[in-house]
Amino acid sequence: MKLDNIRNFCIIAHVDHGKSTLADRLLELTKTVSEREMQEQLLDSMALERERGVTIKASAVRMVYESKDGNEYLINLIDTPGHVDFTYEVSRALQACEGAILVVDASQGIEAQTLTNVYLALEQDLEIIPVINKIDLPAAQPDVIAQEIEDLLGTPAEDMLHISAKNGLGVEDVLEQVIREVPPPVTLPEEPVRALIFDSHYDVYKGVIAYVRMVDGTIGKRDMLKLFATGAKFEPVELGIFDPVMRTVDELKPGEVGYIATGFKTVQECRVGDTITLAVKGTETALPGYEQVKPMVYAGIYPTENDDYSDLRDALDKLQLNDASLTYQPETSQALNFGFRVGFLGLFHMEIIQERLEREYDLDILATAPSVEYRVIQKDGETIEVDSPALLPEENVIDEVLEPWMKIQIYVPQNYIGPIMDLVINKRGIYETTEYLDATRVIIHFEIPLSEIIIDFYDKLKSVTQGYASLDYQFIEYRSGDLVKVEVLVNDESVDALAMICHRDDAYHRGQKLVTKLKDLIPRQMFAVPVQAAIGKRVISRANVKAMRKDVLAKCYGGDVTRKKKLLEKQKKGKKRMKMVGSVEVPQEAFMALLSLDD
């Protein structure tokens, strides 16, 4: 296929605006998939994606289409996620494309992630084709939405395509517009082989399979290849394309999207964002890769059975290959033994990883409450980074604690401004500005500490706005705050997995709520168990889990009172000794109690 007849594009949108449905119709239209094999959300191969109706992994597919001008075109499509936590997936997909279809729901209009994805595409200098979807819905307002997009992008409203991906209405026009407006790939004939790795997954037999976009040169299946960043050399086990299933080919040419099975067995050797070149006479200049993403939310993940520790490590290894934004390192806890401190892009990302570990790797795991990374400036001038509350040093050595702050935008109908203001200001947020999108919808800008939005902020936002609000956030900076560590002591022993870092003003209430919940969750022993919340050496809240009482006076049906006193005194001494040597098991529900303290 000539380079002029190749088109590489992706579909971007807010979550649930119809990206995967449009991809399905394009596959049907180009007859890439037969009617018999067709199913909804075909490119969403994970069971989890189908159940939740969201795209988690970007997926590539190659289509051949005969245009109305009589020419045959090779079209590579990458379907991207829409949730804010998977922006990293989107940015990687955009780097492999020359154009992007921006899908906007005709009944909901521009939402938070729509804008974020548009700005990502503009940064990569892609050709953006706006498409208004779901025009068959009773609540659709295609003309109003077209005007919104014109104000945002400058594309004339009358040039925008109005489609219904579900019914296939106007889908052919989308492909024709892609062919007309998306430029063909540009290649430099004098450059040696250069291929960009934009994704990867692990196969037991073929090792790491790198998804590549060929930029310069041709790779054959007998070529000796090298990874630019790591210097690792290999001969491909297999070359292929996505059709949409993996199909082997003899070579990958400039401008094409395909895969290379490397045979590597470890993640570290083949990194997403690296450049593949020839081992001999390869390129001297790598392709602009992706910046290493920084996790925003951290949580401890522990196997419920200690024997599963190595299985959990292998599972995280394989998931990291599939999801380059995941980071982890080993950690130990007095309460939960050996596990890992895992970094995520957000709470939804954390939820998905937990569910994948349980389903795909059949692991029984326990996750601690999420926390963020704090910077601690000590009195000796040293700065340390703390991603677990248990690691925060003693108050007497801390000079200052800095926490990450986020800039958030909330898109919402204007009659919900009041409840949103209350919600954000109660979470230590700072109001900035309000912008009016049209007569009824506004964007409200706030600054807020990340620790306040990682647990239940999104759920509360949805409930106070009856589901109409959408949220987007970006990191701004680290700011100093009056933050303290609240420790939990069960039977006078600190439980590190229950510690939390919070603002001094909230510490008393949060400590009191947690102690009250733990009192009900910790099972009763033969002795009274004190549950305390403390800041440093100062106890701020206490409750007792009452002892189970054995009636030692049952056999005394009368007689001298001194006999009864003697038996009770003996029981008291026994309980005291039992309390000294007895250990208290903290149930799993106790660790989850941290997630619902604000209810």
Image (cartoon, rainbow, N blue to C red):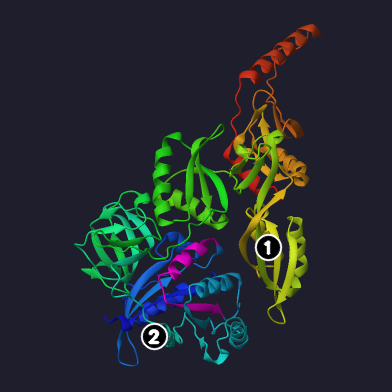
User: Dividing the picture into quarters, in which one does residue 273 lie?
Assistant: bottom left
* Vertical position of residue 123 compared to residue 363: above or below: below
User: Dividing the picture into quarters, in which one does residue 446 lie?
Assistant: bottom right
| Residue 461, numbered circle | 1
Q: Position of residue 77 (x, y in %)?
A: 39, 74
| Residue 179, numbered circle | 2
Q: What is the CA distance from the residue labelled 2 to the residue labelled 1?
A: 41 Å
Left or right of 425, for residue 501: left
Density class for disc 2 (Cα within 10 Å; few <14, some 14-19, many ≥20) is many
Residue under the image location 30 percent in, 89 percent down: 71
* Vertical position of residue 499 compared to residue 274: above or below: above
Residue under the image location 78 percent in, 46 percent down: 505
Q: Nearer the viewer, mark 2 or mark 1?
A: 2
Split into 4 quadrants, where in the image is the N terminus? bottom left
Residue type (three-letter) at the residue carrying disc 2: Ile
Q: Position of residue 121 (x, y in %)?
A: 50, 73
Residue type (three-letter) at the residue carrying disc 1: Leu
Q: Position of residue 246 (x, y in %)?
A: 29, 66
Report the label total. 2
Q: Position of residue 314 (x, y in %)?
A: 39, 45
Q: Which residues are magenta?
A: 85-105
* Vertical position of residue 236 compared to residue 497: above or below: below
> Mark 1: which secondary structure?
helix
